[in-house]
Amino acid sequence: MSDISNFPWLKKLFLKTNISALPHSNLIEGSKGLGKTFLAKHIAKSLLCLNSSSEPCNSCHSCNLFDESTHPDFFMNADDNKILIDEIREMINFSVLSSSVSSSKVIILNNCENMNIASQNAILKTLEEPAANTYIIMTSSKRRSLNQTIYSRCNKFTLKDLDQHELTEWIRSQGMQDFNYYDYPTFLAPLEILKNIEEGRNNEFIDISNYLLQFCNKEISIDEVVKYLLDIDLTSIEKVNLVIDFFKTLLKSKLANLPYSGKFKSLNDIQLVVEDLSDALDELNLLRNNIMKVSAINENHSLKYFMFKLDNLIKQS
């Protein structure tokens, strides 16, 4: 999947970008799993290309070096789980060097939401006064998570989440013809879904949604669905997030005044009320926040409470 044409949402944004007039400081924001790093590297390769000022030619010496990850005019942070000030200093030192192969140098800093305050402050001067012919491309999976001054210095690319049709069409184009949108949590972006399918983890999500649906249809009890959730190999927060996402799926169709489709079709016989679903979501989100703050909260009790809320919603309908 090395060709940007394999990612229509990235290609669309790239085609709107004037590489020859690109500002020196850039920020790509969007949900995890949308391909921000892939877009950043495609832009970087274009900037470094010796034969083109709009997109990489894929045949020049620069493009070959880039593909081999040996380009001397390209820097990308190694550990994007944390970006400490030492790595920012290494980046700054790189930025003032003369280019070796291309007329430009390009720096990619991935997952910049992981920069601490010291690292963010250290990068500001470079963003304000970049070295000649040096481009910085930062990526972040958390919108508005950086110092406001950083935002004011950067040209911003915003990747929007794919809708149900776009996501389904793309996953199926990758050879997953039996993909069902409702089998996966809505917070998973396309590349994450594909990764889970390739790693054989997709059955976890399918089974969870199936159990919750069986519960809604009175086919299994609260104790049965809670026992299943307790036994699966996920963290407490992951389980809670999946249950909350199920509630969101229920609410989304009601807000849009659309009937449930696919395997959720059986829920059309249940008259769920928007206000009740919304109130339950607010309460469950509050409970999730408490679980994140207090790790000692009993998982069994928390999951039972969630299921009791869902059971009450169904009974009220």
Image (cartoon, rainbow, N blue to C red):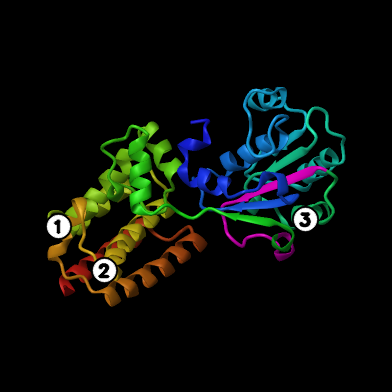
Mark sitting on residue 129: none
Q: Is residue 122 visible?
A: yes
Which of marks 3 and 2 precedes in the sequence? Answer: 3
Which of marks 1 and 2 precedes in the sequence? Answer: 2
Disc 2: which residue:
254
Q: Quadrant of residue 170?
A: top left
Disc 3: which residue:
118
Q: Is mark 2 on a helix, strand or loop?
A: helix
Q: In the depicted view, which residue is nearer to us: 310 or 123?
A: 123
Q: Quadrant of residue 243?
A: bottom left
Q: What element carries label 3?
A: helix
Q: In the depicted view, which residue is nearer to us: 55 or 72?
A: 55
| Alpha carbon distance from label 2 to label 1 | 14 Å
Q: What residue type is labelled 3?
A: Ala
Residue ID at (85%, 46%): 131
Disc 1: which residue:
266
Q: Quadrant of residue 78?
A: top right
**Measured from the top left, where is residue 54 in percent x and y?**
65, 39
Q: What element carries label 1?
A: helix
